[in-house]
Image (spheres, rainbow, N blue to C red):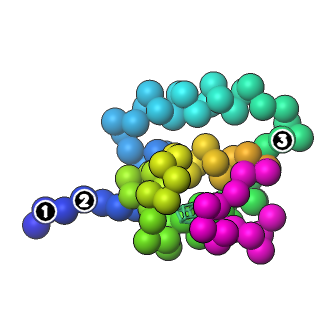
Amino acid sequence: MSGICRKCLIAAQAEAADVEAEMDSFLKLLKPEDLAGEELFSERIAICRECSFLLGATCNACGCYVEFRANVKDGSCPKKKWQHRV
Ligand code: SF4
């Protein structure tokens, strides 16, 4: 059986260690008050996991890595699926 896993986020991809390190560097550039926080991040990622636009940790609607976007407090979903969670 072959196929592409559409639901593997960066954290789940061993080969994505460089991207994960890049995300850590990115997050260190943000002020603590600009971070979404663990609860909001998790809520957003749960929505992404159920979304048909998620493709290999990337949002196919905007091209962003969803984990980058979801970590920013003022981050938004291009399809407004996070709207009620902000
Ligand atoms: S950011 Fe929005 S459109 Fe993109 S994968 Fe997540 S829920 Fe879907």
Q: Which mark is residue 2?
A: 1
Who's the residue at 13% across and 62% down the image? Answer: 2
Who's the residue at 79% across and 51% down the image? Answer: 74
Q: Are marks 1 and 3 in contact (CB under 8 Å)?
A: no
The amino acid type of the residue labelled 1 equals: Ser
> Left or right of 50: which side holds 80?
right
* Residue 77 visible within the image: yes
Disc 1 secondary structure class: loop
Quick check: is 81 in the magenta stretch? yes
Quick check: is 76 in the magenta stretch? yes
Q: Which mark is residue 60?
A: none
Gap between marks 1 and 3 measured at Cα = 40 Å
The amino acid type of the residue labelled 3 equals: Asp
Gap between marks 2 and 1 measured at Cα = 7 Å
- Sequence-first disc among 1 and 3: 1
Pointer 3 residue: 34
Q: Is residue 78 above or below residue 72?
A: below
Q: Position of residue 41 (x, y in %)?
A: 69, 56
Q: Position of residue 20 (x, y in %)?
A: 51, 34
Quadrant of the image where one finds ligand 1: bottom right
Tag 3: Cα neighbours inside 10 Å, few (<14), some, or many (≥20)? some
Q: In which image quadrant can residue 3 be found?
A: bottom left
Pointer 2 residue: 4
> Left or right of 31: which side holds 43?
left
Q: Which residues are magenta?
A: 74-86
Q: Position of residue 43 (x, y in %)?
A: 68, 66
Who's the residue at 75% across and 60% down the image? Answer: 40
Q: In which image quadrant can residue 77 be found?
A: bottom right
Who's the residue at 38% across and 44% down the image? Answer: 13
